[in-house]
Image: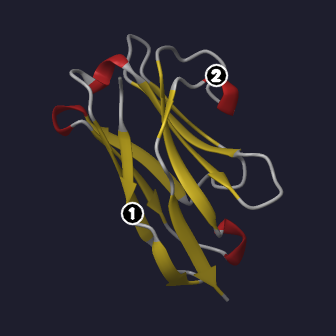
Amino acid sequence: QVQLVESGGGLVQAGGSLRLSCAASVRTLSTYGMGWFRQVPGKEREFVAFSWSGGNRFYAYGDSVKGRFTISRENAKNTVYLQMNSLKPEDTAVYYCAAKYSSIRYGNWDSYDYWGQGTQVIVSS
């Protein structure tokens, strides 16, 4: 059973930065595709970023965060990060880390196998 624990959320002013971390209880993090999603009440979970460490390594981002957010991973530490810069009030949400066994349909929240409990990010104007 994979456990994911997010940290690093909090309150920040618009234009500021935060770095979220996701610690995974896995033997080999490189085996998994790792994603970040976010959700606000009453809305569907939104894709933020994805990292695949397989043979065809790649990164992907949601349109609303491209150029501002960066996903990275330290496989040796079983940790995934989400660096968030130039934050906007509309980035306010609960951010979730998720893991999956493949890179297929990485933008779809229902394709993931494991989820963290989420960390709240609030961006004030």
The quarter of the displayed image where residue 80 is located: top left
Q: Number of labelled discs?
A: 2
Mark 1 is surrounded, within 10 Å at the Cα level, by few (under 14), some (14 to 19) or many (20 or more) other residues, namely: some
Residue 71 badge: none
Q: Nearer the viewer, mark 2 or mark 1?
A: 2
Q: Secondary structure at mark 2?
A: helix
Residue 67: where, in percent of width, then height? 58, 55
Q: Left or right: 120 with respect to 29?
A: right
Residue 103: where, in percent of width, then height? 54, 18
Q: Residue at image x 51%, y 14%?
A: 102
Mark 2 is surrounded, within 10 Å at the Cα level, by few (under 14), some (14 to 19) or many (20 or more) other residues, namely: some
Q: Is residue 19 above or below residue 48?
A: below
Q: Residue furthest top?
A: 55
Residue 97: where, in percent of width, then height? 48, 43
Q: Left or right: 51 with respect to 5?
A: right
For disc 2, the marked residue is 111
For disc 1, the marked residue is 19
Disc on the earlier residue, 2 or 1 = 1
Q: Residue furthest front?
A: 1
Q: Is residue 33 above or below residue 92?
A: above
Q: Residue at image x 52%, y 56%?
A: 69
The quarter of the displayed image where residue 77 is located: top left
**Callout 2 amino acid:** Ser
Q: Residue at image x 46%, y 43%?
A: 116
Residue 30: where, in percent of width, then height? 30, 22
Where the N terminus falls, by quadrant? top left
Q: Secondary structure at mark 1?
A: strand
